[in-house]
């Protein structure tokens, strides 16, 4: 099916070509065919989008003067507009990224929920009164930052952009979104929703373009007050540097190497399902993937057997015209990176329990077999580095202490899972895990209401929940002498 959605940049309420006239092609990873040709923003377009957002954030602007109830109504209208386009966005996301429509539909639904959740926050962003000595009134106000930049990755293109746009807008900021140039299409629908919802011009701008030029220029722009970056740890470090010149705040949502800690008292059927979803959903291209299975020796064989039988005949396909349950990798180069990791796992002495390469029955599409390695030690490359593909590394341990040591021995600290029916053990292990998110007997899971983010090199700051409102506001303290 050919693409019929928006292909231009959305700047200051207008659809426009890039100033340079540049475009870039996006490829459907299931067919390897060009799916769409999209305007590609350069530095001039970044300047135009930031200028529009800056004007829309000015103190006397319509957006800044809008009451919180009306701003909440605008966000609800925005969510309604997305809901109207839900089927179309879902299919576009599926073609652009390779994820199945079932998976893409979950992402779009999560964004709609997120906008509705933050629509309820607009009139609840309060300050406090502070008791100080003397005849004084002392209070704080939480104020918007101004222009916030949002740089998003290709693995959840629609969802990860929406999760940071919603709180930024709810807090009264204006936004410039630069989606990944690999998967730029679904983000353009945010422009359409802004038109439908009647956002003032310049409040929301979308400029697909390359990371190094458009992304770098945006992150270092003097009129940007905050950068919300989701992507790799390597680029996250660069973004922090880029933003530092103008002392601009950052939220960094970076990579992960999530462990599942499985104890002998766990419900193994539920565990197997959770572990499977946590690594084979989205073709394993998930920051929060549970890519290390740290399992007690007493239940190792039974759990591995259950997982192998679940995925040995896993239907691979786009899910659009077939019964595909796991889509392809996003691009040929990413497929190759994952296959290289699989080869490295074999060379370092891990055993392939299932999968281990490209499927034999797929001539077209960047597919990878769901792969499980057993006999992995935590010093192997496949246990240390984020593969970002459907590859599970199984590490056998003797007891709780060893499980914790292995789980915490990682440069990353995003999401972790615990599988046990012992309530004391569950909370004890949760307390001792060095991860920003811990889920007991369920994986992977998150909600618009709960903070999402990582310890260590998995990031800085938090998206979602009340915490994101704090990220996208600044505190002003006011002191009044009453005499
Ligand atoms: P990436 O870091 O290559 O790119 C992310 C974004 O940054 C893209 O829009 C890209 O164009 C842009 N970019 C590239 N160079 C830049 C620069 N110098 N300055 C500013 N922007 C620049 O990441 P990716 O390959 O698109 O996504 C995969 C990575 O994202 C994985 O590491 C994954 O773990 C991580 N991720 C993290 C989360 C989270 O919430 N923690 C969620 C999803 C993905």
Image (cartoon, rainbow, N blue to C red):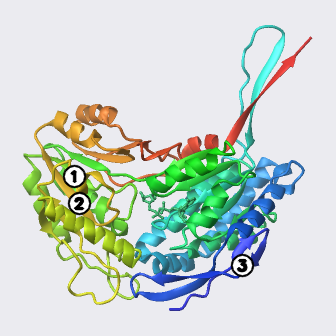
Dot 3 alpha-carbon crowd within 10 angstroms: few under 14, some 14 to 19, many 20 or more: few
Residue 428 coordinates in the image, percent (x, y):
28, 31
Q: Which residue is mark 2?
A: 392
Identified at 75% across, 70% down, the residue is 11
Residue 370 coordinates in the image, percent (x, y):
24, 70
Residue 371 position (above or below residue 118)? below
Identified at 36% across, 55% down, the residue is 444
Q: Is mark 1 within 8 Å of ligand 1?
A: no
Dot 1 alpha-carbon crowd within 10 angstroms: few under 14, some 14 to 19, many 20 or more: many
Residue 401 is left or right of residue 481, and the answer is left
Residue 141 coordinates in the image, percent (x, y):
75, 33
Secondary structure beneath dot 3 equals loop
Q: Which residue is mark 3?
A: 20
Separation of residues labelled 2 and 1 (CA atoms): 7 Å
Q: Quadrant of residue 191?
A: bottom right
Q: Which residue is mark 1?
A: 293
């Amino acid at each position: 099916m050919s693409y019929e959605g928006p292909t231009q940049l959305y700047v200051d309420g207008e659809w426009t070509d890039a100033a340079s006239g540049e475009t870039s092609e996006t490829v459907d990873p299931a067919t390897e065919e060009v799916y769409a040709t999209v305007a590609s923003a350069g530095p001039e377009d970044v300047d135009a989008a930031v200028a529009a957002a800056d004007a829309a954030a000015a103190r006397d602007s319509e957006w800044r003067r809008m009451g919180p109830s009306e701003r909440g109504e605008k966000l609800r209208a925005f969510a309604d507009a997305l809901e109207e386009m839900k089927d179309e966005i879902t299919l576009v996301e599926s073609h652009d990224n390779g994820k199945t429509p079932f998976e893409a539909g979950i992402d779009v639904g999560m964004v709609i929920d997120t906008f509705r959740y933050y629509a309820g926050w607009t009139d609840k962003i309060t300050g406090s009164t502070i008791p100080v000595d003397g005849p004084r009134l002392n209070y704080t106000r939480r104020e918007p930052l101004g222009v916030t930049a949002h740089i998003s990755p290709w693995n959840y293109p629609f969802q990860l952009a929406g999760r940071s746009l919603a709180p930024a807008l709810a807090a009264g900021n204006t936004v410039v979104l630069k989606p990944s140039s690999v998967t730029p299409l679904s983000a353009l629908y945010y422009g359409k929703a802004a038109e439908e919802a009647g956002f003032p011009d310049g409040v929301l701008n979308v400029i697909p373009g390359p990371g190094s030029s458009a992304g770098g220029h945006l992150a270092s722009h003097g009129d940007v007050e905050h950068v919300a970056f989701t992507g790799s740890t390597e680029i996250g470090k660069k973004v922090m540097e880029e933003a530092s010149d103008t002392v601009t705040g950052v939220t960094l949502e970076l990579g992960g190497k999530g462990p599942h800690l499985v104890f002998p008292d766990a419900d193994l059927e539920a565990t197997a399902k959770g572990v499977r979803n946590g690594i084979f959903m989205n073709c394993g291209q998930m920051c929060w993937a549970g890519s290390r299975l740290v399992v007690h020796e007493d239940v190792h064989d039974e759990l591995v057997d259950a997982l192998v039988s679940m995925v040995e005949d896993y239907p691979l396909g786009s899910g659009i015209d077939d019964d595909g349950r796991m889509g392809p990798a996003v691009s040929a180069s990413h497929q190759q990176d994952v296959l290289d990791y699989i080869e490295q796992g074999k060379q370092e002495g891990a055993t392939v329990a299932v999968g281990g390469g490209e499927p034999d029955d797929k001539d077209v599409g960047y597919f990878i077999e769901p792969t499980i390695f057993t006999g992995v030690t935590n010093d192997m490359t496949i246990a240390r580095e984020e593969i970002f593909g459907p590859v599970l590394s199984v590490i056998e341990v003797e007891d709780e202490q060893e499980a914790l040591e292995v789980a915490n021995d990682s440069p990353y600290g995003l999401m972790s899972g615990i599988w046990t029916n012992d309530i004391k053990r569950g909370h004890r292990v949760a307390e001792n895990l060095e991860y920003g998110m811990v889920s007991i007997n369920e994986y992977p899971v998150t909600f618009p209401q709960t903070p999402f983010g990582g310890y260590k090199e998995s990031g800085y700051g938090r998206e979602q929940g009340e915490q994101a409102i704090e990220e996208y506001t600044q505190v002003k303290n006011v002191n009044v002498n009453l005499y």
